[in-house]
């Protein structure tokens, strides 16, 4: 028996609402048929927010997290019209979401986005999410493969160059792809449905492929080897297409809790899955290289770093919990254009990197007032805090996250000196958008009974390892009331991360 979402998709493809946008803009959000408003609009990246009805969220696709100064200006202009209600978040998939959006403005917004090469198509529901890559691709001398072009080509295949592609708008569930070209696993390959990691096979540099990684409230799994190696060219695009076709045509659809790719791999076994995928390719799918080249620990890319291009630098700026306002977009746009090459990069840690800054402009850049807010060298706890959206805008949230995450690290920093960065990830519910399982300390929102009342609480995850030999952390403390978290976190920081009391 098909679940509700399958029926919605079978009745009318999600992309079909594009033809109705002008009409929706005229009738207003209250009068849009519910299935279109709450579900199908997500195929265009337009998310109805029950927490702020009438103020939609727009989720872009920013492949590889690459943005231009012009695009930042356009995004700032879009949210500026909503005053205090407009803001933007850098997401844990190196992407941007903006808020406050009125449905009547969507036709105008979409034409503005198109004019600067941005799209939000197929960014929600049963589609492939933003495709991630190393945020310093093309900039560092130790890079193995510059994946920027590949990521764009995979996105173009999936979205038909941003125009929308009905071939891949009815997957059984969401789908995550990452292509790593660096040595530090900056993309968290292990938590993607498909990830490409650099590997030499018989002296040729290409990618080993891992499949089936995902988080959900029901189950969390790290990706497993497909036992496949591909060249860093059209083979990557073709393999993504083949995997998506197999998943689309054979993925499990009856139970939405069991429809991510790993459930199909479980049912078939990875050998059969591989055979079905290989059968769709026009080239022989080679077995994996014996080892991959992920041999660094993960970096946070904050601070000033010389690029491989002599005399140029990238400058990583810390964006507390990824939150930006219109003026921040304008300012980043200005800094990127006047100090760099007009390009910025987003990271899965929800930060932003200015690139191609000449040595002689560094001093003036570092003296810019904006860098008081977005620091190049924040304290060790603050610099590594990541948070999902939480209760401010997300109806699934069991707790507020972003403000709480910042307040907590500020309180802990007053209490402790921490010798090196500790990655603390907050997520407002078991959907795990804030990836607590990859953190040094992960906090997952929950509700807890305390003194006869229901209060905000968190489950505490420890042991997540990222970069080389990545593995997922596990829940070690359950249902801690949020007002009891600070002493517990302080104790963990002292015992496991070398913190000392001030
Ligand atoms: Fe997520 C659903 C926000 C990354 C697992 N996620 C949602 C929704 C759309 C729910 C909703 O409609 O309210 C959230 C939107 C709230 C809002 O208003 O912002 C939401 N997810 C986010 C973001 C914005 C968190 C952030 O603050 O950075 C991230 C956007 C990524 C992007 O740019 O596309 C985000 N979500 C993730 C990740 C992390 C990742 O991809 O590395 C995960 C876990 C990895 C995974 O998917 O395997 C994740 N989100 C989920 C799930 C659980 C999926 C499942 O298979 O059950 C849901 C719920 C669902 O899909 O039914 C969900
Ligand atoms: Fe919302 Fe839960 Fe995802 Fe946080 S983890 S954004 S609360 S769905």
Image (spheres, rainbow, N blue to C red):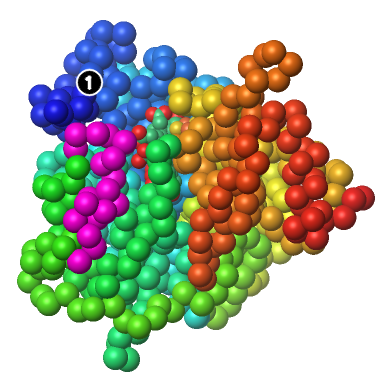
Q: Residue at x 57, y 29 (%)?
A: 446
Q: Is residue 160 visible?
A: no
Q: Quadrant of residue 271?
A: bottom left
Q: Is residue 127 visible?
A: yes
Residue 23 appears left or right of 226: left
The answer to whether 329 is drawn above or below residue 236 in the figure is above
Q: Residue at x 13, y 66 (%)?
A: 275
Q: Residue at x 72, y 51 (%)?
A: 381
Q: Quadrant of residue 168?
A: top left
- Position of residue 338 measured from the top left corner of the image (x, y, whole percent): 55, 56
- Position of residue 278 measured from the top left corner of the image (x, y, whole percent): 13, 68
- Position of residue 99 measured from the top left corner of the image (x, y, whole percent): 45, 28
- Furthest toward the bottom, the residue is 203
For the N terminus, the quadrant is: top left
Quadrant hosting ligand 1: top left
Graded by Cα atoms within 10 Å as few (under 14), some (14 to 19) or many (20 or more), the crowding at tag 1 reads: some
Q: Residue at x 41, y 57 (%)?
A: 222
Residue at mark 1: 36
Q: Is residue 258 rendered magenta in the image? A: yes
- Position of residue 91 measured from the top left corner of the image (x, y, whole percent): 47, 44
Residue 205 appears left or right of 322: left
Looking at this view, is 386 or 332 the one in front?
Answer: 386
Q: Which residues are magenta?
A: 253-271
């Amino acid at each position: 028996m098909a679940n509700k979402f399958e029926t919605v998709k079978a009745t009318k493809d999600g992309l079909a609402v594009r033809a109705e946008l002008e009409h929706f803009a005229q009738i207003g959000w209250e009068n849009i048929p519910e299935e279109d408003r709450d579900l199908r609009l997500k195929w265009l990246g337009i998310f109805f927010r029950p927490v702020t009805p009438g103020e939609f969220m727009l989720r872009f696709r920013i492949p590889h997290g690459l943005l231009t100064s012009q695009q930042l200006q356009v995004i700032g202009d879009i949210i500026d019209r909503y005053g205090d209600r407009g803001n933007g978040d850098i997401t844990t998939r190196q992407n941007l979401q903006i808020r406050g959006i009125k449905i009547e403005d969507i036709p105008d917004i979409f034409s503005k986005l198109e004019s600067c090469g941005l799209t939000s198509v197929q960014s929600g529901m049963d589609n492939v999410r933003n495709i991630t890559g190393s945020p310093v691709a093309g900039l560092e001398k130790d890079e193995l493969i510059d994946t920027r072009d590949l990521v764009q080509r995979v996105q173009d295949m999936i979205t038909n160059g941003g125009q929308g592609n009905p071939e891949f708008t009815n997957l059984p569930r969401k789908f995550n792809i990452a292509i790593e070209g660096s040595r530090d696993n900056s993309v968290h390959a292990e938590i993607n449905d498909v990830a490409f990691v650099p590997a030499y096979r018989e002296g040729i540099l290409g990618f080993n492929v891992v499949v089936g990684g995902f988080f959900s409230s029901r189950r969390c799994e790290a990706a497993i080897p497909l036992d496949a190696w591909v060249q860093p060219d059209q083979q990557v695009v073709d393999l993504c297409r083949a995997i998506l076709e197999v998943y689309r045509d054979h993925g499990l659809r009856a139970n939405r809790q069991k429809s991510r790719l790993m459930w199909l791999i479980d049912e078939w076994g990875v050998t059969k899955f591989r055979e079905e995928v290989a059968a769709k390719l026009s080239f022989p799918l080679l077995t994996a290289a014996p080892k991959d080249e992920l041999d660094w620990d993960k970096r946070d890319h904050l601070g000033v770093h010389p690029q491989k291009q002599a005399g140029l630098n990238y400058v990583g700026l810390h964006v507390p919990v990824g939150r930006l306002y219109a003026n921040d977009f304008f300012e980043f746009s200005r800094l990127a254009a006047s100090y760099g090459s007009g390009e910025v990069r987003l990271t899965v840690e929800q930060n932003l990197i200015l690139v191609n800054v000449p040595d002689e402009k560094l001093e003036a850049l570092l003296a810019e007032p904006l860098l008081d807010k977005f620091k190049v060298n924040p304290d060790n706890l603050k610099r590594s805090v990541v948070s999902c959206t939480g209760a401010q805008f997300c109806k699934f949230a069991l707790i507020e996250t972003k403000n709480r995450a910042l307040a907590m690290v500020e309180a802990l920093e007053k209490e402790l000196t921490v010798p090196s960065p500790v990655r603390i990830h907050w997520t407002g519910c078991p959907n795990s958008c804030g990836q607590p399982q990859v953190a040094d300390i992960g906090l997952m929102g929950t509700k807890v009974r305390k003194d006869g009342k229901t209060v905000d609480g968190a489950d505490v995850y420890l042991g997540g390892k990222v970069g080389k030999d990545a593995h997922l952390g596990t829940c070690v403390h359950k249902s801690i009331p949020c007002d009891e978290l600070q002493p517990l976190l302080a104790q963990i920081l002292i015992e496991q991360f070398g913190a000392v009391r001030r």
